[in-house]
Image (spheres, grey):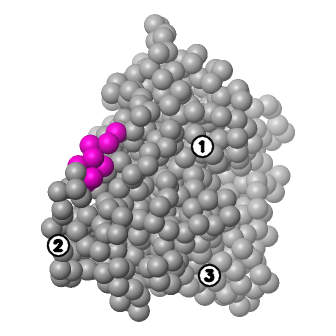
Amino acid sequence: MEQNPYLPITMRLAKNLVETEDRNINTFTLEFLNKQDEENFKYMPGQFAELSAFGYGEAPFGIATSPTEPGILKFSVAKVGCVSNALHLMEEGTMVGVRGPMGNYYPVEEFKGKNLVIIGGGFAFTTLRALAVYMLDPAHRGDYGDITVIYGARNPGLLLYKEELAAWENNPNINLVTTIDRPAEGWTKHVGFIPSITEQVAPSSVNTYAVVCGPPAMIKFTLPVLEKLNFPPERIYTSLEMRMKCGLGICGRCNIGTEYVCKDGPVFSMAQLKDLPSEY
Amino acid sequence: MKISKEKFGQSIDALSSDYRLIAPVSEAGGVNYKAVKNFSDVKQDYLNSKLPPKSFFFPQHEKLLSYVKNGKDVTVKNELQAEKTILFGVRPCDSKGLLLLDKVFKNDQYQDPYYYERRKNTVVIGMACKTIAPTCFCSSMGLSPASSEGADIFLIDLGDSYELEIITEKGKALLGDLGLSELSAQEQALVDAVKSAQTTSQVDVSTITEKLDKMFDNPYWENLQEKCLGCNTCSFSCPTCHCFDISEEVRQNSGSRVRTWDACMAPLFTLHGSGHNPRSTQKARWRQRMMHKFNYFVHNNGDIACVGCGRCIRSCPVNMDMRQVIDGVNKAELVVE
Protein backbone atom coordinates (compact mmCIF):
# COMPACT_ATOMS: atom_id res chain seq x y z
CA MET A 1 0.00 0.00 0.00
CA GLU A 2 1.04 3.59 -0.66
CA GLN A 3 2.18 5.71 2.25
CA ASN A 4 -0.84 6.98 4.21
CA PRO A 5 -0.81 10.80 3.91
CA TYR A 6 -3.34 11.20 6.74
CA LEU A 7 -1.02 9.73 9.38
CA PRO A 8 1.15 12.31 11.15
CA ILE A 9 4.64 11.70 12.41
CA THR A 10 5.23 12.77 16.00
CA MET A 11 7.76 15.47 16.80
CA ARG A 12 8.86 16.79 20.19
CA LEU A 13 7.97 20.36 21.13
CA ALA A 14 11.48 21.40 22.17
CA LYS A 15 10.69 25.08 22.70
CA ASN A 16 7.46 27.01 23.07
CA LEU A 17 8.54 30.65 22.80
CA VAL A 18 6.35 33.71 23.23
CA GLU A 19 7.31 35.64 20.11
CA THR A 20 5.40 38.95 20.33
CA GLU A 21 4.75 41.30 23.24
CA ASP A 22 0.98 40.93 22.92
CA ARG A 23 1.57 37.20 23.62
CA ASN A 24 -0.59 36.37 20.62
CA ILE A 25 2.11 34.65 18.61
CA ASN A 26 4.31 31.81 19.80
CA THR A 27 7.11 30.12 17.93
CA PHE A 28 7.20 26.36 18.30
CA THR A 29 10.47 24.55 17.72
CA LEU A 30 9.81 20.91 16.92
CA GLU A 31 12.52 18.24 16.92
CA PHE A 32 12.51 15.20 14.67
CA LEU A 33 12.56 12.03 16.76
CA ASN A 34 14.72 10.08 14.32
CA LYS A 35 16.79 10.39 11.15
CA GLN A 36 14.24 8.50 9.07
CA ASP A 37 11.44 10.98 9.81
CA GLU A 38 13.76 13.85 8.90
CA GLU A 39 14.86 12.11 5.67
CA ASN A 40 11.22 11.71 4.66
CA PHE A 41 10.42 15.35 5.44
CA LYS A 42 12.29 17.00 2.58
CA TYR A 43 10.91 20.51 2.18
CA MET A 44 11.56 23.91 0.61
CA PRO A 45 10.83 27.48 1.77
CA GLY A 46 7.15 28.34 1.30
CA GLN A 47 5.77 24.90 2.09
CA PHE A 48 3.46 24.22 5.02
CA ALA A 49 2.54 21.36 7.33
CA GLU A 50 -0.54 20.23 9.24
CA LEU A 51 0.22 20.39 12.96
CA SER A 52 -1.90 18.42 15.39
CA ALA A 53 -2.43 18.92 19.07
CA PHE A 54 -3.79 15.49 19.96
CA GLY A 55 -7.15 15.92 21.63
CA TYR A 56 -7.86 19.19 19.82
CA GLY A 57 -7.34 18.71 16.11
CA GLU A 58 -5.20 19.69 13.20
CA ALA A 59 -4.48 22.94 11.33
CA PRO A 60 -2.13 24.08 8.54
CA PHE A 61 0.80 26.43 9.25
CA GLY A 62 3.66 27.70 7.08
CA ILE A 63 7.09 26.30 7.93
CA ALA A 64 9.26 29.11 9.32
CA THR A 65 12.54 27.23 9.13
CA SER A 66 14.64 26.68 6.03
CA PRO A 67 15.80 23.21 4.96
CA THR A 68 19.31 24.52 5.65
CA GLU A 69 18.52 24.30 9.38
CA PRO A 70 18.63 20.56 10.09
CA GLY A 71 16.97 18.59 12.89
CA ILE A 72 14.10 20.95 13.59
CA LEU A 73 11.03 22.68 12.21
CA LYS A 74 9.75 26.02 13.48
CA PHE A 75 6.25 27.43 13.25
CA SER A 76 5.13 30.88 14.40
CA VAL A 77 1.43 30.65 15.13
CA ALA A 78 -1.19 33.20 16.20
CA LYS A 79 -3.65 32.19 18.87
CA VAL A 80 -6.87 32.04 16.87
CA GLY A 81 -8.83 28.86 17.43
CA CYS A 82 -8.96 25.53 19.21
CA VAL A 83 -5.76 23.99 17.80
CA SER A 84 -3.59 27.12 18.00
CA ASN A 85 -4.72 27.76 21.59
CA ALA A 86 -3.88 24.20 22.58
CA LEU A 87 -0.45 24.54 20.97
CA HIS A 88 0.21 27.82 22.78
CA LEU A 89 -0.57 26.21 26.13
CA MET A 90 1.40 23.05 25.42
CA GLU A 91 4.26 22.11 27.76
CA GLU A 92 7.69 21.74 26.23
CA GLY A 93 8.55 18.10 25.64
CA THR A 94 5.02 17.19 24.50
CA MET A 95 4.57 15.25 21.26
CA VAL A 96 2.96 17.12 18.37
CA GLY A 97 1.63 15.49 15.19
CA VAL A 98 3.06 16.72 11.90
CA ARG A 99 1.89 15.92 8.36
CA GLY A 100 3.79 17.26 5.42
CA PRO A 101 5.56 18.95 3.85
CA MET A 102 2.64 20.17 1.77
CA GLY A 103 2.10 22.51 -1.13
CA ASN A 104 4.50 24.14 -3.55
CA TYR A 105 7.30 26.55 -2.63
CA TYR A 106 8.85 29.85 -3.63
CA PRO A 107 10.51 29.35 -7.04
CA VAL A 108 14.09 29.56 -5.77
CA GLU A 109 15.39 28.00 -9.02
CA GLU A 110 13.69 30.70 -11.09
CA PHE A 111 15.11 33.38 -8.74
CA LYS A 112 18.69 32.29 -9.49
CA GLY A 113 20.81 35.09 -10.91
CA LYS A 114 18.16 37.65 -9.97
CA ASN A 115 17.74 40.26 -7.23
CA LEU A 116 14.95 39.68 -4.77
CA VAL A 117 12.81 41.98 -2.68
CA ILE A 118 10.90 40.25 0.11
CA ILE A 119 8.01 42.32 1.46
CA GLY A 120 6.24 41.12 4.61
CA GLY A 121 3.73 42.46 7.06
CA GLY A 122 2.72 41.29 10.53
CA PHE A 123 2.98 37.63 11.33
CA ALA A 124 2.88 36.60 7.66
CA PHE A 125 6.66 36.78 7.85
CA THR A 126 7.16 33.09 8.66
CA THR A 127 7.76 31.48 5.26
CA LEU A 128 9.42 34.72 4.12
CA ARG A 129 11.94 34.20 6.91
CA ALA A 130 12.44 30.65 5.62
CA LEU A 131 13.07 32.02 2.12
CA ALA A 132 15.58 34.64 3.33
CA VAL A 133 17.45 32.12 5.48
CA TYR A 134 17.58 29.66 2.58
CA MET A 135 19.04 32.25 0.21
CA LEU A 136 21.50 33.57 2.82
CA ASP A 137 22.92 30.09 3.38
CA PRO A 138 26.55 30.03 2.15
CA ALA A 139 25.68 27.16 -0.19
CA HIS A 140 23.03 29.31 -1.94
CA ARG A 141 23.96 32.97 -1.44
CA GLY A 142 26.14 33.04 -4.56
CA ASP A 143 23.15 32.00 -6.70
CA TYR A 144 21.32 35.27 -6.08
CA GLY A 145 21.89 38.99 -6.57
CA ASP A 146 20.89 41.64 -4.03
CA ILE A 147 18.46 40.55 -1.34
CA THR A 148 16.26 43.25 0.17
CA VAL A 149 13.80 42.54 3.00
CA ILE A 150 11.09 45.08 3.81
CA TYR A 151 9.29 44.01 6.95
CA GLY A 152 6.71 45.92 8.93
CA ALA A 153 4.52 45.50 11.99
CA ARG A 154 2.13 47.72 13.94
CA ASN A 155 4.75 48.36 16.64
CA PRO A 156 8.24 47.09 17.50
CA GLY A 157 6.96 44.49 19.94
CA LEU A 158 5.00 42.74 17.20
CA LEU A 159 7.97 42.06 14.94
CA LEU A 160 8.87 38.37 14.76
CA TYR A 161 12.41 37.00 15.11
CA LYS A 162 13.85 40.18 16.68
CA GLU A 163 17.31 38.72 17.40
CA GLU A 164 17.65 37.50 13.85
CA LEU A 165 16.55 40.88 12.48
CA ALA A 166 19.25 42.53 14.61
CA ALA A 167 21.84 40.17 13.11
CA TRP A 168 20.62 40.90 9.57
CA GLU A 169 21.08 44.64 10.23
CA ASN A 170 24.84 44.01 10.31
CA ASN A 171 24.94 41.37 7.60
CA PRO A 172 26.35 42.73 4.29
CA ASN A 173 24.61 39.92 2.37
CA ILE A 174 21.15 41.29 3.04
CA ASN A 175 19.57 44.73 3.02
CA LEU A 176 16.97 44.86 5.81
CA VAL A 177 14.38 47.62 6.09
CA THR A 178 12.04 47.45 9.08
CA THR A 179 9.12 49.75 9.67
CA ILE A 180 6.35 50.27 12.20
CA ASP A 181 2.97 51.95 11.64
CA ARG A 182 3.31 54.78 14.18
CA PRO A 183 6.30 56.34 15.98
CA ALA A 184 7.31 54.53 19.17
CA GLU A 185 9.77 55.41 21.90
CA GLY A 186 13.26 54.13 21.18
CA TRP A 187 12.44 53.24 17.55
CA THR A 188 15.01 54.72 15.16
CA LYS A 189 14.12 52.89 11.92
CA HIS A 190 11.37 53.64 9.39
CA VAL A 191 7.88 54.66 10.38
CA GLY A 192 5.03 54.18 7.91
CA PHE A 193 2.91 51.57 6.18
CA ILE A 194 4.51 48.93 3.98
CA PRO A 195 3.23 50.29 0.63
CA SER A 196 4.70 53.76 1.12
CA ILE A 197 7.96 52.44 2.59
CA THR A 198 8.20 50.03 -0.36
CA GLU A 199 7.83 52.95 -2.74
CA GLN A 200 10.71 54.74 -0.98
CA VAL A 201 13.19 51.90 -0.58
CA ALA A 202 12.38 49.16 -3.11
CA PRO A 203 15.24 48.23 -5.42
CA SER A 204 14.97 48.72 -9.17
CA SER A 205 12.64 46.23 -10.79
CA VAL A 206 15.28 45.44 -13.41
CA ASN A 207 16.26 41.78 -13.08
CA THR A 208 14.36 41.65 -9.76
CA TYR A 209 11.58 39.46 -8.33
CA ALA A 210 9.24 40.52 -5.52
CA VAL A 211 7.71 38.19 -2.93
CA VAL A 212 4.86 39.77 -0.98
CA CYS A 213 3.11 38.27 2.01
CA GLY A 214 0.91 39.90 4.60
CA PRO A 215 -2.60 40.93 5.58
CA PRO A 216 -5.01 41.47 2.63
CA ALA A 217 -5.03 45.26 3.04
CA MET A 218 -1.25 45.39 2.87
CA ILE A 219 -1.15 43.25 -0.27
CA LYS A 220 -3.94 45.25 -1.87
CA PHE A 221 -2.03 48.53 -1.50
CA THR A 222 1.46 47.14 -2.15
CA LEU A 223 0.67 45.58 -5.53
CA PRO A 224 -0.08 48.93 -7.25
CA VAL A 225 3.22 50.25 -5.88
CA LEU A 226 5.10 47.32 -7.41
CA GLU A 227 3.22 47.85 -10.64
CA LYS A 228 4.27 51.51 -10.62
CA LEU A 229 7.87 50.36 -10.08
CA ASN A 230 7.49 48.23 -13.24
CA PHE A 231 7.47 44.78 -11.65
CA PRO A 232 5.54 42.61 -14.13
CA PRO A 233 2.93 40.21 -12.63
CA GLU A 234 5.11 37.22 -13.61
CA ARG A 235 7.80 38.49 -11.23
CA ILE A 236 5.58 39.11 -8.21
CA TYR A 237 4.87 36.10 -5.99
CA THR A 238 2.66 35.73 -2.96
CA SER A 239 1.54 32.95 -0.66
CA LEU A 240 -2.17 32.49 0.10
CA GLU A 241 -4.04 31.25 3.14
CA MET A 242 -7.21 29.17 3.04
CA ARG A 243 -9.19 27.06 5.43
CA MET A 244 -7.89 23.52 4.88
CA LYS A 245 -8.51 20.06 6.21
CA CYS A 246 -6.80 17.30 4.25
CA GLY A 247 -3.99 19.32 2.67
CA LEU A 248 -4.06 16.83 -0.21
CA GLY A 249 -6.44 18.44 -2.70
CA ILE A 250 -9.31 16.10 -1.83
CA CYS A 251 -11.54 17.57 0.90
CA GLY A 252 -12.70 20.31 -1.43
CA ARG A 253 -12.69 23.60 0.49
CA CYS A 254 -9.53 25.54 -0.39
CA ASN A 255 -10.02 25.88 -4.15
CA ILE A 256 -9.79 29.11 -6.08
CA GLY A 257 -11.38 28.08 -9.35
CA THR A 258 -9.60 24.97 -10.57
CA GLU A 259 -6.63 25.35 -8.21
CA TYR A 260 -6.40 23.90 -4.74
CA VAL A 261 -4.36 26.22 -2.54
CA CYS A 262 -3.12 23.24 -0.50
CA LYS A 263 -1.73 21.24 -3.41
CA ASP A 264 -1.36 23.68 -6.35
CA GLY A 265 -0.35 26.57 -4.03
CA PRO A 266 0.05 28.19 -1.58
CA VAL A 267 2.62 30.10 -3.66
CA PHE A 268 1.18 31.82 -6.74
CA SER A 269 2.48 34.51 -9.06
CA MET A 270 0.30 37.53 -9.66
CA ALA A 271 0.13 36.45 -13.30
CA GLN A 272 -1.44 33.13 -12.19
CA LEU A 273 -3.88 34.85 -9.83
CA LYS A 274 -5.04 37.21 -12.58
CA ASP A 275 -6.38 34.17 -14.46
CA LEU A 276 -8.27 32.81 -11.44
CA PRO A 277 -11.59 33.98 -9.99
CA SER A 278 -11.14 36.58 -7.25
CA GLU A 279 -12.53 34.30 -4.58
CA TYR A 280 -9.92 34.35 -1.83
CA MET B 1 -26.04 -14.79 -22.10
CA LYS B 2 -28.22 -15.40 -19.09
CA ILE B 3 -28.22 -17.06 -15.69
CA SER B 4 -31.17 -17.93 -13.46
CA LYS B 5 -31.54 -15.73 -10.40
CA GLU B 6 -31.50 -18.85 -8.25
CA LYS B 7 -28.19 -20.03 -9.62
CA PHE B 8 -26.69 -16.53 -9.50
CA GLY B 9 -27.81 -16.18 -5.87
CA GLN B 10 -26.19 -19.50 -4.99
CA SER B 11 -22.90 -18.32 -6.49
CA ILE B 12 -23.03 -15.10 -4.49
CA ASP B 13 -24.02 -16.88 -1.25
CA ALA B 14 -21.14 -19.33 -1.75
CA LEU B 15 -18.77 -16.35 -1.48
CA SER B 16 -20.22 -15.17 1.84
CA SER B 17 -17.33 -16.46 3.92
CA ASP B 18 -14.90 -14.25 1.97
CA TYR B 19 -17.06 -11.26 1.07
CA ARG B 20 -19.70 -9.19 2.77
CA LEU B 21 -22.66 -8.59 0.50
CA ILE B 22 -23.98 -5.03 0.24
CA ALA B 23 -27.22 -4.73 -1.68
CA PRO B 24 -30.43 -2.70 -1.90
CA VAL B 25 -32.96 -3.41 0.84
CA SER B 26 -36.29 -1.84 1.77
CA GLU B 27 -36.33 0.20 4.93
CA ALA B 28 -38.45 2.96 6.38
CA GLY B 29 -38.32 5.88 3.99
CA GLY B 30 -37.13 3.97 0.95
CA VAL B 31 -34.50 1.66 -0.47
CA ASN B 32 -30.87 1.83 0.63
CA TYR B 33 -27.71 -0.23 0.35
CA LYS B 34 -27.11 -2.37 3.44
CA ALA B 35 -25.16 -5.45 4.43
CA VAL B 36 -27.35 -8.54 3.82
CA LYS B 37 -26.77 -12.16 4.88
CA ASN B 38 -28.35 -13.97 1.96
CA PHE B 39 -28.97 -13.12 -1.64
CA SER B 40 -32.68 -13.87 -1.07
CA ASP B 41 -32.85 -10.75 1.18
CA VAL B 42 -31.91 -8.46 -1.69
CA LYS B 43 -34.63 -6.20 -3.04
CA GLN B 44 -34.92 -6.90 -6.75
CA ASP B 45 -37.39 -4.25 -7.89
CA TYR B 46 -36.31 -0.78 -6.89
CA LEU B 47 -36.03 2.51 -8.66
CA ASN B 48 -32.82 3.58 -7.00
CA SER B 49 -31.52 3.95 -3.45
CA LYS B 50 -32.17 7.13 -1.49
CA LEU B 51 -28.45 7.57 -0.89
CA PRO B 52 -25.81 6.57 -3.42
CA PRO B 53 -23.50 3.65 -2.53
CA LYS B 54 -20.46 5.97 -2.27
CA SER B 55 -20.58 5.52 1.52
CA PHE B 56 -19.06 2.02 1.22
CA PHE B 57 -15.87 3.64 -0.07
CA PHE B 58 -16.19 7.04 1.58
CA PRO B 59 -18.34 6.56 4.70
CA GLN B 60 -20.36 9.43 6.14
CA HIS B 61 -18.27 8.99 9.30
CA GLU B 62 -15.02 7.06 9.60
CA LYS B 63 -12.01 6.83 11.86
CA LEU B 64 -8.77 7.74 10.11
CA LEU B 65 -6.57 7.11 13.13
CA SER B 66 -6.72 6.70 16.87
CA TYR B 67 -4.24 7.82 19.51
CA VAL B 68 -3.43 7.25 23.14
CA LYS B 69 -1.67 9.93 25.18
CA ASN B 70 0.63 8.96 28.01
CA GLY B 71 2.03 12.04 29.74
CA LYS B 72 3.85 13.96 27.03
CA ASP B 73 4.02 10.94 24.71
CA VAL B 74 1.50 9.77 22.19
CA THR B 75 0.96 6.57 20.22
CA VAL B 76 -0.87 6.82 16.90
CA LYS B 77 -2.65 3.90 15.26
CA ASN B 78 -3.87 3.67 11.68
CA GLU B 79 -7.58 2.76 11.62
CA LEU B 80 -7.85 1.92 7.92
CA GLN B 81 -10.28 -0.93 7.38
CA ALA B 82 -11.30 -2.32 4.01
CA GLU B 83 -13.40 -5.48 4.06
CA LYS B 84 -13.73 -7.57 0.93
CA THR B 85 -17.11 -6.60 -0.45
CA ILE B 86 -19.58 -7.43 -3.18
CA LEU B 87 -21.64 -4.33 -3.95
CA PHE B 88 -24.71 -5.61 -5.73
CA GLY B 89 -27.34 -3.81 -7.79
CA VAL B 90 -25.60 -0.53 -8.48
CA ARG B 91 -27.44 1.66 -11.00
CA PRO B 92 -25.53 3.03 -14.03
CA CYS B 93 -25.52 6.59 -12.66
CA ASP B 94 -23.92 5.44 -9.42
CA SER B 95 -21.29 3.18 -10.95
CA LYS B 96 -20.25 6.10 -13.17
CA GLY B 97 -20.22 8.19 -9.99
CA LEU B 98 -17.60 5.85 -8.55
CA LEU B 99 -15.38 6.38 -11.60
CA LEU B 100 -15.62 10.12 -10.99
CA LEU B 101 -14.79 9.73 -7.29
CA ASP B 102 -11.77 7.64 -8.34
CA LYS B 103 -10.42 10.80 -9.99
CA VAL B 104 -10.93 12.83 -6.81
CA PHE B 105 -9.35 10.42 -4.36
CA LYS B 106 -6.26 10.09 -6.53
CA ASN B 107 -4.71 13.25 -7.93
CA ASP B 108 -1.37 14.24 -9.44
CA GLN B 109 0.27 14.06 -5.99
CA TYR B 110 -1.72 11.95 -3.56
CA GLN B 111 -3.80 8.81 -3.31
CA ASP B 112 -6.32 8.39 -0.51
CA PRO B 113 -5.60 4.95 0.97
CA TYR B 114 -8.92 4.65 2.84
CA TYR B 115 -10.96 5.07 -0.33
CA TYR B 116 -8.64 3.12 -2.59
CA GLU B 117 -8.20 0.07 -0.33
CA ARG B 118 -11.98 -0.29 -0.24
CA ARG B 119 -12.24 0.27 -3.95
CA LYS B 120 -9.62 -2.44 -4.56
CA ASN B 121 -11.44 -4.87 -2.28
CA THR B 122 -14.88 -4.32 -3.76
CA VAL B 123 -16.51 -5.91 -6.77
CA VAL B 124 -19.28 -3.75 -8.25
CA ILE B 125 -22.24 -5.57 -9.78
CA GLY B 126 -24.26 -3.13 -11.84
CA MET B 127 -27.95 -3.39 -12.67
CA ALA B 128 -29.77 -1.78 -15.58
CA CYS B 129 -32.80 0.39 -14.82
CA LYS B 130 -36.12 -0.90 -16.11
CA THR B 131 -38.09 1.91 -14.52
CA ILE B 132 -37.02 5.46 -15.12
CA ALA B 133 -37.98 8.23 -12.73
CA PRO B 134 -39.20 11.61 -13.98
CA THR B 135 -36.19 13.17 -12.24
CA CYS B 136 -33.65 10.91 -14.00
CA PHE B 137 -31.55 12.63 -16.66
CA CYS B 138 -28.56 10.31 -17.08
CA SER B 139 -29.11 10.18 -20.86
CA SER B 140 -28.04 13.82 -20.95
CA MET B 141 -24.85 13.03 -19.10
CA GLY B 142 -23.41 10.54 -21.56
CA LEU B 143 -25.01 7.54 -19.84
CA SER B 144 -28.16 5.52 -20.29
CA PRO B 145 -30.38 3.33 -18.09
CA ALA B 146 -28.32 0.34 -19.30
CA SER B 147 -24.76 1.67 -19.41
CA SER B 148 -22.26 -0.54 -17.65
CA GLU B 149 -19.50 2.04 -17.10
CA GLY B 150 -17.92 1.50 -13.69
CA ALA B 151 -19.41 -1.96 -13.12
CA ASP B 152 -17.30 -5.14 -12.93
CA ILE B 153 -20.31 -7.30 -13.78
CA PHE B 154 -23.47 -5.94 -15.35
CA LEU B 155 -26.98 -7.41 -15.12
CA ILE B 156 -30.30 -6.83 -16.80
CA ASP B 157 -33.28 -8.22 -14.88
CA LEU B 158 -35.31 -10.67 -17.03
CA GLY B 159 -37.75 -11.79 -14.34
CA ASP B 160 -36.52 -15.20 -13.22
CA SER B 161 -33.05 -14.69 -14.64
CA TYR B 162 -30.45 -12.03 -15.46
CA GLU B 163 -28.77 -11.15 -18.69
CA LEU B 164 -25.18 -11.15 -17.46
CA GLU B 165 -22.16 -9.41 -18.87
CA ILE B 166 -18.67 -9.69 -17.39
CA ILE B 167 -17.10 -6.24 -17.78
CA THR B 168 -13.72 -6.48 -16.03
CA GLU B 169 -11.11 -9.07 -15.04
CA LYS B 170 -12.11 -8.44 -11.44
CA GLY B 171 -15.70 -9.42 -12.28
CA LYS B 172 -14.51 -12.49 -14.14
CA ALA B 173 -12.35 -13.59 -11.22
CA LEU B 174 -15.23 -13.26 -8.75
CA LEU B 175 -17.72 -15.57 -10.35
CA GLY B 176 -15.58 -18.07 -12.27
CA ASP B 177 -17.40 -20.35 -14.68
CA LEU B 178 -21.14 -19.91 -14.22
CA GLY B 179 -22.51 -22.07 -17.01
CA LEU B 180 -24.47 -19.37 -18.80
CA SER B 181 -27.22 -20.16 -21.28
CA GLU B 182 -28.48 -18.45 -24.43
CA LEU B 183 -31.26 -15.86 -24.34
CA SER B 184 -34.59 -16.75 -25.93
CA ALA B 185 -35.83 -14.48 -28.73
CA GLN B 186 -38.32 -12.94 -26.32
CA GLU B 187 -35.62 -12.28 -23.73
CA GLN B 188 -33.35 -10.80 -26.39
CA ALA B 189 -36.13 -8.40 -27.32
CA LEU B 190 -36.45 -7.35 -23.69
CA VAL B 191 -32.69 -6.81 -23.42
CA ASP B 192 -32.73 -4.73 -26.60
CA ALA B 193 -35.57 -2.62 -25.27
CA VAL B 194 -33.75 -1.92 -21.98
CA LYS B 195 -30.54 -1.11 -23.82
CA SER B 196 -32.20 1.38 -26.13
CA ALA B 197 -34.16 3.16 -23.40
CA GLN B 198 -33.44 6.81 -22.65
CA THR B 199 -34.50 9.07 -19.81
CA THR B 200 -37.52 11.21 -20.70
CA SER B 201 -36.05 14.20 -18.96
CA GLN B 202 -33.16 15.82 -20.81
CA VAL B 203 -30.87 18.79 -20.40
CA ASP B 204 -28.24 20.23 -22.69
CA VAL B 205 -24.72 20.26 -21.26
CA SER B 206 -22.93 20.32 -24.61
CA THR B 207 -21.50 23.83 -24.14
CA ILE B 208 -21.91 24.40 -20.40
CA THR B 209 -18.22 24.15 -19.50
CA GLU B 210 -17.17 26.81 -22.02
CA LYS B 211 -20.14 28.96 -21.05
CA LEU B 212 -19.22 28.79 -17.36
CA ASP B 213 -15.64 29.82 -18.22
CA LYS B 214 -17.11 33.26 -18.83
CA MET B 215 -19.72 33.33 -16.07
CA PHE B 216 -17.96 33.75 -12.72
CA ASP B 217 -19.09 37.39 -12.43
CA ASN B 218 -22.42 36.88 -14.23
CA PRO B 219 -25.56 38.34 -12.62
CA TYR B 220 -27.22 34.93 -13.14
CA TRP B 221 -25.93 33.84 -9.72
CA GLU B 222 -27.54 36.80 -7.93
CA ASN B 223 -31.08 35.43 -7.60
CA LEU B 224 -30.54 31.77 -8.30
CA GLN B 225 -30.02 30.73 -4.70
CA GLU B 226 -32.63 32.88 -3.00
CA LYS B 227 -34.74 29.96 -1.80
CA CYS B 228 -31.78 27.69 -0.94
CA LEU B 229 -31.70 26.83 2.76
CA GLY B 230 -28.07 25.67 2.65
CA CYS B 231 -29.15 22.33 4.13
CA ASN B 232 -26.56 20.27 2.19
CA THR B 233 -28.97 17.46 1.31
CA CYS B 234 -28.12 17.86 -2.38
CA SER B 235 -24.46 17.18 -1.61
CA PHE B 236 -25.04 14.37 0.82
CA SER B 237 -27.25 12.53 -1.66
CA CYS B 238 -24.95 13.21 -4.61
CA PRO B 239 -22.92 10.27 -5.95
CA THR B 240 -20.03 12.57 -6.93
CA CYS B 241 -19.88 15.01 -4.00
CA HIS B 242 -16.80 14.23 -1.96
CA CYS B 243 -16.07 17.13 0.37
CA PHE B 244 -15.25 16.22 3.94
CA ASP B 245 -14.28 17.55 7.32
CA ILE B 246 -11.63 16.13 9.65
CA SER B 247 -12.20 16.52 13.38
CA GLU B 248 -11.37 14.76 16.62
CA GLU B 249 -13.47 12.67 18.96
CA VAL B 250 -11.80 12.93 22.32
CA ARG B 251 -11.93 10.93 25.50
CA GLN B 252 -9.72 11.67 28.47
CA ASN B 253 -6.35 10.43 27.24
CA SER B 254 -7.30 8.86 23.98
CA GLY B 255 -9.29 9.71 20.95
CA SER B 256 -9.61 9.39 17.25
CA ARG B 257 -9.36 11.57 14.21
CA VAL B 258 -12.50 11.19 12.14
CA ARG B 259 -13.55 12.15 8.68
CA THR B 260 -17.17 13.15 8.07
CA TRP B 261 -19.06 14.33 5.02
CA ASP B 262 -19.09 18.08 4.62
CA ALA B 263 -20.39 20.28 1.84
CA CYS B 264 -19.77 23.53 0.01
CA MET B 265 -23.29 24.81 0.68
CA ALA B 266 -22.46 25.48 4.35
CA PRO B 267 -20.96 28.84 5.38
CA LEU B 268 -18.52 27.32 7.89
CA PHE B 269 -16.99 25.19 5.15
CA THR B 270 -14.59 27.94 4.04
CA LEU B 271 -14.48 30.21 7.13
CA HIS B 272 -10.91 31.25 7.97
CA GLY B 273 -9.57 31.44 11.52
CA SER B 274 -9.33 35.21 11.04
CA GLY B 275 -13.08 35.48 10.42
CA HIS B 276 -12.61 36.13 6.71
CA ASN B 277 -14.75 33.93 4.47
CA PRO B 278 -13.98 33.73 0.74
CA ARG B 279 -17.42 32.22 0.06
CA SER B 280 -19.51 34.16 2.54
CA THR B 281 -22.80 34.22 0.64
CA GLN B 282 -25.16 31.50 -0.60
CA LYS B 283 -24.69 33.05 -4.03
CA ALA B 284 -20.95 32.29 -3.88
CA ARG B 285 -21.66 28.79 -2.61
CA TRP B 286 -24.18 27.92 -5.33
CA ARG B 287 -21.79 29.29 -7.91
CA GLN B 288 -19.09 27.05 -6.44
CA ARG B 289 -21.41 24.02 -6.64
CA MET B 290 -22.17 24.64 -10.31
CA MET B 291 -18.65 25.67 -11.24
CA HIS B 292 -17.12 22.68 -9.51
CA LYS B 293 -19.37 20.12 -11.16
CA PHE B 294 -19.61 21.59 -14.64
CA ASN B 295 -16.40 23.56 -15.05
CA TYR B 296 -13.53 23.09 -12.55
CA PHE B 297 -13.96 19.29 -12.48
CA VAL B 298 -13.97 19.16 -16.28
CA HIS B 299 -10.78 21.23 -16.49
CA ASN B 300 -9.06 19.10 -13.83
CA ASN B 301 -10.41 15.65 -14.63
CA GLY B 302 -11.91 15.73 -18.11
CA ASP B 303 -15.46 14.87 -17.06
CA ILE B 304 -18.59 16.61 -15.79
CA ALA B 305 -19.12 15.70 -12.12
CA CYS B 306 -22.84 15.03 -12.50
CA VAL B 307 -24.34 11.72 -13.54
CA GLY B 308 -27.99 12.75 -13.82
CA CYS B 309 -29.29 10.55 -10.99
CA GLY B 310 -31.73 13.26 -9.94
CA ARG B 311 -31.31 12.68 -6.20
CA CYS B 312 -30.61 16.37 -5.51
CA ILE B 313 -33.89 17.20 -7.24
CA ARG B 314 -35.87 14.62 -5.28
CA SER B 315 -34.34 15.49 -1.92
CA CYS B 316 -34.37 19.28 -2.07
CA PRO B 317 -36.83 20.68 0.50
CA VAL B 318 -37.42 23.83 -1.54
CA ASN B 319 -37.59 22.21 -4.98
CA MET B 320 -34.40 23.52 -6.45
CA ASP B 321 -33.89 21.61 -9.67
CA MET B 322 -30.43 21.03 -11.12
CA ARG B 323 -31.95 20.71 -14.60
CA GLN B 324 -33.44 24.20 -14.35
CA VAL B 325 -30.15 25.60 -13.06
CA ILE B 326 -28.32 24.04 -16.02
CA ASP B 327 -30.94 25.45 -18.33
CA GLY B 328 -30.52 28.83 -16.67
CA VAL B 329 -26.79 28.76 -17.33
CA ASN B 330 -27.45 27.88 -20.96
CA LYS B 331 -29.84 30.81 -21.32
CA ALA B 332 -27.87 33.35 -19.26
CA GLU B 333 -26.70 36.38 -21.17
CA LEU B 334 -22.97 36.87 -21.11
CA VAL B 335 -21.84 40.18 -19.73
CA VAL B 336 -19.53 41.95 -22.12
CA GLU B 337 -16.78 43.76 -20.25
Is the residue B38 above or below the residue A176 in the image?
A: below
| Residue at left offset 50%, top offset 31% | B323
Is the residue A267 above or below the residue B244 in the image?
A: above
Q: Which residues are magenta?
A: B190-198
Report which residue position mark 2 lands on: B181
Q: Chain of mark 2?
A: B
- On the image, the x and y values in percent for residue B155 come to 31, 63
The kind of secondary structure element at disc 3 is strand
| Residue at left offset 53%, top offset 50% | B238
> Which of the marked residues, 2 or 3, is nearer the chain's N terminus?
3
Q: Nearer the viewer, residue A176 or B245?
A: B245
Report which residue position mark 1 lands on: B314
Q: Chain of mark 1?
A: B
Q: Is residue B7 visible?
A: yes
- Mark 2: which amino acid? Ser
Report which residue position mark 3 lands on: B66
